[in-house]
Image (spheres, rainbow, N blue to C red):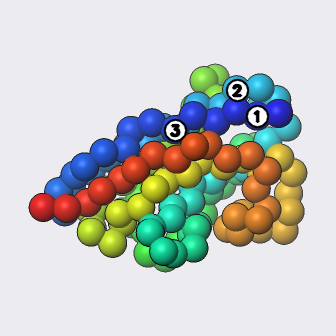
């Protein structure tokens, strides 16, 4: 089992920045990738970014490329999502997730095995 706890969400004005954190505990040695997804009210859960545990390769949704950065700190079993130039359409609950073994892609929610409880990000003036 892997437990994930997200933090860092909140209310920010358009153009502002936030940094989300996701702390993992438990069987973290069996991790292929960690990802961030988001879900706005009435919409599906969408891929945001992912990072491969072994070599740090990163992947991003087109909508966040150039604005968001995913990173990791292996010693702390923590992954971060730095979000800059935030837009109102970035408003959503953001979820951290773990893919324990390679499942063919890192951008499908169904390929992830463990999820955090989510943290709300609201971008509004």
Vertical position of residue 20 compared to residue 77: above or below: below
| Residue 108 drawn at (x, y percent) | 71, 69
Q: Secondary structure at mark 2?
A: strand
Residue at 82 percent of width and 33 percent of height: 1
The quadrant the C terminus occupies is bottom left
Mark 3 and 1 residues: CB-CB less than 8 Å, in contact? no
**Alpha-carbon distance for marks 3 and 1?**
13 Å
Where's residue 58, x and y in %?
A: 60, 57
The residue depicted at 79 percent of the width and 50 percent of the height is 113
Circle 2 residue = 25
Tally of numbered discs: 3
Residues at discs 1 and 2 in contact (Cβ within 8 Å) = yes
Viewed as shown, does residue 32 lie left or right of 23? right
Q: Which residue is mark 1?
A: 2
Task: Name the mark on residue 6.
Answer: 3
Q: Residues within 10 Å of mark 3 (few under 14, many from 20)?
A: many
In percent of width and height, residue 64 lies at 43, 68
């Amino acid at each position: 089992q892997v437990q994930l706890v997200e933090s860092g969400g909140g209310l920010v004005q358009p153009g502002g920045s936030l940094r989300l954190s996701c702390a993992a505990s438990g069987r973290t040695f069996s991790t292929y990738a960690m990802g961030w997804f988001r879900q706005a009210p009435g919409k599906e859960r969408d891929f945001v970014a992912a990072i491969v545990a072994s070599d740090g390769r990163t992947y991003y949704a087109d909508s966040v490329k150039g604005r968001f950065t995913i990173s990791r700190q292996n010693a702390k079993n923590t992954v971060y999502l730095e979000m800059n130039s935030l837009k109102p359409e970035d408003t959503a609950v953001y979820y951290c997730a773990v893919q324990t073994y390679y499942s063919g892609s890192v951008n499908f929610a169904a390929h992830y095995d463990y999820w955090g409880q989510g943290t709300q990000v609201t971008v509004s003036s």
